[in-house]
Amino acid sequence: MNKAMSSWVAGANAADTDFSLNNLPYGVFSTHGQAPRCGVAIGDMILDVAQAEMAGLTGTQDLLQQAVWNPLMKAGPKVWAAFRARLIGLLKEGSAHVEDLTPMLVPMSDAAMHMPFRVAEYTDFYAGKQHAQNVGTMFRGPENALPPNWLHIPIGYNGRASTVVVSGTDIRRPVGQTKAKDAANPVFGPSQRLDIELEIGAIVGTPSDMGQPVTVAQAREMIFGYVLLNDWSARDLQAWEYQPLGPFQAKAFATSISPWIVTAAALAPFAAPAPDREVPLLPYLVEDTPGLYDIDLFVHMNGHQISHTNMQELYYSSAQQLAHHASSGCAMRSGDLLGSGTISGPKPDNYGSLLEMTWGGQNPITLGDQTRRFIEDGDRLTLTGHAQGDGYRVGFGACTGTILPAPDFYKETT
Amino acid sequence: MNKAMSSWVAGANAADTDFSLNNLPYGVFSTHGQAPRCGVAIGDMILDVAQAEMAGLTGTQDLLQQAVWNPLMKAGPKVWAAFRARLIGLLKEGSAHVEDLTPMLVPMSDAAMHMPFRVAEYTDFYAGKQHAQNVGTMFRGPENALPPNWLHIPIGYNGRASTVVVSGTDIRRPVGQTKAKDAANPVFGPSQRLDIELEIGAIVGTPSDMGQPVTVAQAREMIFGYVLLNDWSARDLQAWEYQPLGPFQAKAFATSISPWIVTAAALAPFAAPAPDREVPLLPYLVEDTPGLYDIDLFVHMNGHQISHTNMQELYYSSAQQLAHHASSGCAMRSGDLLGSGTISGPKPDNYGSLLEMTWGGQNPITLGDQTRRFIEDGDRLTLTGHAQGDGYRVGFGACTGTILPAPDFYKETT
């Protein structure tokens, strides 16, 4: 494991900050109502790298001026590596640029965060085996829990990019069609079984061409970085709509991501193998090097921790998912976001959704003096996660969202 | 029905041209390797409207200079109507602008066509009842053919925007996982059951906000125009992958659209009601005015006509689909493309896919002295369609694609 690096920005050397010098994640911030710009988190500060680039300090040109990271993402792995090396040089203890950079540091507490990149397309996978087994058991019984293709295919479906929002964005409770088991007809109204899904999102940096599949090794090189991802889900809409063509409006209303993109380079020291294969994979999916990361993940609901799990619970890596995504000849774009699928560990307090924690709403969870089966209006859900180094952390910051009441629309149309 | 309008561009007055003055569809073209630009089809000619705008003739400013129609699409229904009225004035018999415009006309035969708009996101629906019944019967038996939600929900799933291509683009046969019913394990290789789906695509012009559902009437106003759409499908990949989260790589490799966007205004005289409801719709989906169009649709394979159907075979209109799409609070974007679902009529020669025409490959179709169960390498598939007025047509031009052999990739990874 990498050693902790020391920064002249004091807050970055705290053992419990997500934003050590070893991390250096990328976000987009604004202060005092000014225009958003690219920044790098370091301790409790943000380095205004748009300004640093203008001053000729970053080794890049015109890659950091658009208030999204897409231009750097497109530039490819060599530019990513050179930029990261330069950032480390600028921010490490003993840097020659302390005086130049000090005026470009903004306290994180003064900053509002914005979407760190333009999402090209959003795809959500289903790569957590415990999750697939839990959900399958509830929907189809324990004998048919795992679909027959699950151990062969990193199953995924296309999601909706227009509603991927940054942490802190309030989420309106969705309305939609639901049908009670014993009802003759569906009704239209606010979802009564609103849920989270704890996931990690991989961001594609370099694209692939239509008609040109990629290997798992190539896919790994294409991945720019990772975010925490909450795939908000309306379970009652989902149960009624999802056969035969998959989830649609049950997932389309919102997906929240953490404001900081943690680079693949920062996570490299924490690479961890996927679980042993239960059946051999087809050769196009075989991964020679560890493709997961040892990232501890947490869910808080109204301040109470309700889950703790780890990315290593996934059965397929993001590189395997990306290789499968391109396998048909599907062109992959710079800015594509790939949700990992819900990451559930072995026990209820390791599960990544309320559906699993409460076993379909049967066993409410406790939040102090309250209980919950699903999410109520005003509830605040927060994902956090970090890799633990020797004396330092590489973390994502919080991915949070508060649920607002459903829009009045449904009252006018029912 | 509108009367035929006469144009000073002689070819537009031919009874069998797709591109009468009543039509005026929007495309993007190039000639002699020059940069692509916005054009309007009129008879056998294309009016270079990028040039016409520069000359101050179109009543628009900076909406036609980007070689995609997205800027006009975003400008909204009032601008669409004013622009169309101006075009009719410029191109009708007796126009005062014949001399100005003649040098801006390019023979269609000299032009290469390009994508007419940037696709924001692509969604595919499943609104043809005959198609849903045919496919359901093959997959689940006649008793369970129509899913229980089908008569209540315009079922749809998110598709892949990165591989929507303009007519004339060659399509590589996809590779992927398939599993024979009696095989223990899947294999990876070229699809052996490659198919078309005959659809019409609706293009969203004006966007909607996240958390803000829209009514069917509002949805209708948001639709800019329509294209023919071929949702290429690998049936063997689809059968193995689609449970439980829907089609993914079986559809992700390619979707072809016609080069000309026929506006909602041009189709208005051909508005036609959807079939009678078999069960009442929930109020948010009720449509007060006819939402389909009387558009004859044809499929040719290697020059042989293999199907003839009509858009009126759909059970849900594009406005109903769009209202459902936004119902959860999903933000809709200018440039979203909504495939109608496969449009099949009552008999095999009205079916919109080979899967249905050959009943899962059991009954080959005849093409001259050849037969086909599914698509072979080198086969050319062409969709055409038009609404028939009194002495004139409003048509889309051809949506065509030729299948190339699978990439070698799979050989290296199997």
Image: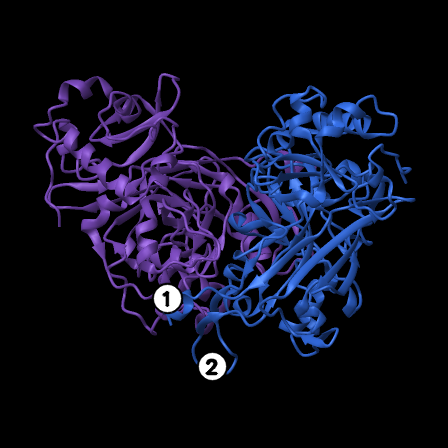
Chain colours: A blue, B purple
Q: Which mark is residue A183?
A: 2
Viewer-proximal residue among A245 and B240: A245
Q: Position of residue B32 (x, y in %)?
A: 36, 16
Q: For mark 2, name the chain.
A: A
> Taking the image as drawn, is residue B24 in sight?
yes
* Disc 1 residue crowd, few under 14, some 14–19, many 20+, Cα 10 Å: many
In which quarter of the view is residue A355 placed?
Answer: bottom right
- Of residue B5 and residue A370, the one placed in the foreground of this image is A370
Label ID, residue A52: none
Q: Quadrant of residue B62?
A: top left
| Quadrant of the drawing holding the N terminus of chain A | top right
Residue B316 locus on image (x, y percent): 34, 60
Name the quadrant of the C terminus of chain A.
Answer: bottom left
Which residue position is annotated with label 1?
B284
Who's the residue at 79% across and 59% down the image? A309
Q: Secondary structure at mark 2?
A: loop
In the image: residue A249, left or right of residue B371 = right
Q: Do the CB atoms of the residues marked 1 and 2 lie less than 8 Å apart? A: no
